[in-house]
Image (spheres, helix red, strand yellow):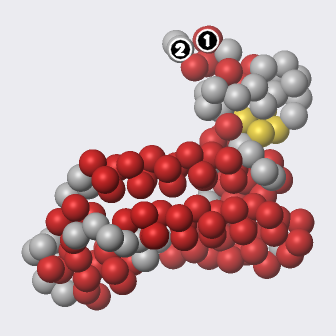
Amino acid sequence: MADIASFCACAVEVGRYAEIEACVTANSDSSESDCFCQIEAMGSAHAEYVACLAEAVEGYTACVAPLTCDEQIDLGPQENECFGAFLDANHVCYKLSTEAVLAEEACLDVGPPFMCNSGEPIPNTYVCDGDDDCEDKSDESDGLCNP
């Protein structure tokens, strides 16, 4: 989503919210922001991951900037195209640092990491994503991904 202030200004304009503050409150996830800040504070070990995610957000924001509020809020085809590109960019970022994604998932308390049959932990977001991340490929097994 474009920056929260722009999104909320549009949401108020099209009548989804009466005021910007209510929209910001409803659409802010402080735990996600706090976790991202913690990962960023870990320093250079996760710098490439943090920079990649920031670039993905900037790309999305630039992509939706020319859209009208109706196109952004109603998730029209152009916004969907922007969001698809954003998700693709995030997928690239997630593969840059297994350690950073594990730290982020731990901070967000999404549960324990996936344990490969070969013994190594991988982030839950890596499971059934089309990439073999476990040495033994157990994260992409038919039984797990196509029950």
Q: Residue at x 61, y 11 (%)?
A: 143
Q: Is residue 86 above or below residue 54?
A: above
Measured as percent of width and height from the top left, residue 81 is found at 38, 49
Q: Residue at x 88, y 29 (%)?
A: 119
Q: Residue at x 62, y 11 (%)?
A: 142
Amino acid of disc 2: Asn
Q: Determine the image quadrant of residue 104.
A: bottom right
**For mark 1, what is the residue?**
143
Around disc 2, counting alpha carbons within 10 Å, would you say few (fewer than 14), some (14 to 19), or many (20 or more)? Answer: few
Measured as percent of width and height from the top left, residue 54 is found at 63, 69
Q: Is residue 121 above or below residue 24?
A: above
Residue 146: assigned label: 2
In the picture, the quarter occupied by the N terminus is bottom left
Mark 2 and mark 1 residues within 8 Å of each other at the beta carbon: yes
Q: Does any portion of residue 30 appear in the rendered image?
A: yes
Q: Does any portion of residue 27 appear in the rendered image?
A: no
Measured as percent of width and height from the top left, residue 85 is found at 49, 50
The secondary element bearing badge 1 is classed as helix
Q: Residue at x 20, y 58 (%)?
A: 74
Q: Is residue 100 above or below residue 15?
A: above
Amino acid of disc 1: Gly
Q: Determine the image quadrant of residue 122.
A: top right
Give the residue furthest to the front: 66
Q: Nearer the viewer, residue 64 or 73?
A: 64
In this rendering, the count of numbered labels is 2
The secondary element bearing badge 2 is classed as loop
